Amino acid sequence: MGRIAGVTAAETRERLLRAAADVFAERGYDGTRVADIAAAAGVSNGALYAHFGSKADLLVAALRAHGRSMLAELLAADPGRPVNEVLLVIGRKLPRRPDVRGRLIVEALVAARRDQDVALPMRDYLGERAGQISGLVRGAQDAGDLDPALSPEALAHFCLLLAMGSALVTPDLHAVADEEWADLLTRVVTVLAPAGITAERESTP
C-alpha cells in the first residue's frame, strides 16, 4: 500500500489530514500510531512520512487545517464586517463546540504539556493564531470600533483562553443558556468599544 494511483500529492496530504483529525479525536494522541493514520488514509507509512516528519507535526497540521475555517469563512463572507461582530459570532459558538476541532485542541494541549516535540509546533501555532487576532484588533482600533488603549496582544490572549477553555469545558461537563451567554458576550464587547461609542450605546433607548 503506497501512493494511490491517480491521486495527487496535495490530495494525499488532505487525505492524511482528515484521517489524522479523526483518529486523534477518537484515540487520543498517545493512543494513536502513525500506522493507524496511514491505514485510515489508505496509504503507506512511507507516504505519510513523505508529507509529515513526525506524529507531532501531523497533529498540529491537522489542527491548523481544521482551526482556521471559522474565522476565515466569516471574513471571506463579509470582509467589511466589524471585528466586534466577528468576535460575537465566534464567541456564541464556543459553548456548543464538541466537534473534531475541539477534540484536536484538547489532545494537542495535553500532549504539549509532556512532549516537547508537540510543544514546539503548538507554540508556533498559537503564536500564529494570536497574531491573526491581534492584527484584526489593530484594524478595528484604526476603524474606531475598539478602544485604542487596549493591548491587541492582551485581547488576542484573552480570545485564545476563551477558545481553548471552551474545548475543555464542554456542554456535557457544564452548560449555560444560549441567551445568557450571548448577553454576557455583548456586554463584554460593548466595554471594549471606545468610550464615546460605549456611552452613546448606553444612552440609546
Image (cartoon, rainbow, N blue to C red):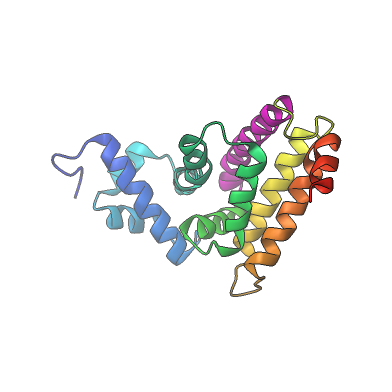
Q: Residue at x 52, y 64 (%)?
A: 98
x, y percentage for residue 155?
Answer: 75, 41
- Name which quarter of the figure residue 105 lies in: bottom right
> Relative to 190, does residue 147 appear above or below in the rendering?
above
Number of marks in picture: 0
Asked if residue 169 can be seen in this view, the reply is no
Q: Residue at x 72, y 34 (%)?
A: 145
State which region is magenta.
Answer: 113-142
In the drawing, does residue 60 fall left or right of residue 124?
Answer: left
Foreground pick, 81 / 204: 204
Foreground pick, 63 / 185: 185
In the drawing, does residue 21 fall left or right of residue 118?
Answer: left
Residue farthest to the front, as pictured? 205
x, y percentage for residue 9?
Answer: 26, 35
Magenta stretch: helix, strand or loop mostly = helix
Foreground pick, 57 / 74: 74
> Relative to 176, does residue 50 appear above or below in the rendering?
above
Asked if residue 88 can be seen in this view, the reply is yes
In the drawing, does residue 71 fall left or right of residue 2?
Answer: right
Residue farthest to the left, as pictured? 5
Q: Residue at x 65, y 29 (%)?
A: 135
- Name which quarter of the figure residue 95 lies in: bottom right
Foreground pick, 127 / 159: 159
Q: Residue at x 60, y 60 (%)?
A: 167
x, y percentage for residue 102?
Answer: 54, 58
88 in the magenta segment = no
138 in the magenta segment = yes
x, y percentage for residue 90?
Answer: 59, 50
